[in-house]
Image: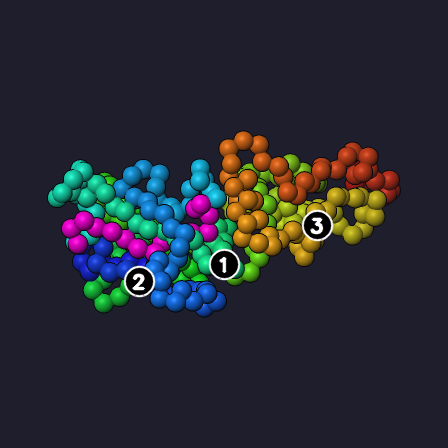
Amino acid sequence: MVGIQDYQDDFFKLQNMWCKYMFPYKPASQGAYPYYPSCHVKDFAVPNQNFCFDAQNAARTVNTFMTALRDDEFSFFIFRPGIGYGTDGTQQYKCCKTPPGYYIDYVSCYYKPTRDQYWEYYDSQNHFVVFCTAGFVMTGIARKLSPINRDYHIEWIQCCRVGYGPPRVQVTPQAGMPSTSYDNSSIPYSAQYRSLDDEDKDLDQAYLPSHQPHATYRMPPALDQVPTISSDAEAVEWQSLRYKKGPVPKLLRLKPPTPMALHTTMLGSGLVSI
């Protein structure tokens, strides 16, 4: 699935869904069903079930994407509260694992809302407005109560990129300011995924000019030296380790420079020894 559509009811319901074939290298199923043998079902009417991926069951749910929706009345209403016939307390959807060789690039994920900031919904009789860009698939969906009419609406879908080949090992996101600064300056905080290599480039270019021959800084491995995952089994094991509750070992450890390493004896440079 790559998109959803509602004609005119502010995503009170789902009118159509957009499905696209994303896996040209998938082995032929010879007519057998299911076409994706490793699948699971979730319910986006239940709290904390808005994503195919589940950190508490990473080995089974990693690299999964949405393939189907279910409704017990064939109307796909989602706005009526309660549980049972005539209500919409159950909103099941199916997620399946990518074929061998493919993976979900979770660093690239983004959300596609169903409305603008004025609570005008993107419903249209002639166009799909809420859909993922090329190369991305739906990996999550959510409904929320509107503060205007207190009814449920589809609020957003999550889109993630489909990759092919061995995925790169992603280092832990850098949340907050780096621990190192130079010349009374610091790297501006940016709310995004930053690798150690990105941070080190900033430090090297902005705070360690080439005229400081005695200033040294421990650099992380080059980009082409970052370890890669070579098999699906290894990918599942690594993802399970990353999202497992408890201490997670750092794949790339960057040691801060010592005072002696940063000491410079250049005279007339205007630099103060640390």
User: Label 1: few (<14), some or many (≥20) within 10 Å?
Assistant: some
Where does residue 48 sit, x and y in percent of width and height? Answer: 35, 38
Residues at marks 2 and 1 touching, judged by CB atoms closer than 8 Å: no
| Residue 34 visible in the picture | yes
Disc 1 residue type (three-letter)? Pro
Q: Residue at x 40, y 55 (%)?
A: 37
Q: Earlier in the sequence, mark 3 or mark 1?
A: 1
Percent of width and height locating residue 85: 13, 43
Q: Give the numbered dot on residue 100.
A: 1
> What span is in magenta?
60-74
Marks 2/1: CA–CA distance: 23 Å
Specify which label sits upstream in the sequence, 3 or 2. 2
- The amino acid marked with disc number 3 is Pro
Pointer 2 or 1: first along the chain: 2
Identified by mark 2, the residue type is Trp
Whole-Å distance between the Cαs marked 3 and 1? 29 Å
Q: Residue at x 63, y 39 (%)?
A: 250
User: Which residue is tagged 3?
Assistant: 221
> From where the camera sits, is residue 115 visible?
no
* 59 versus 121 height, above or below: above
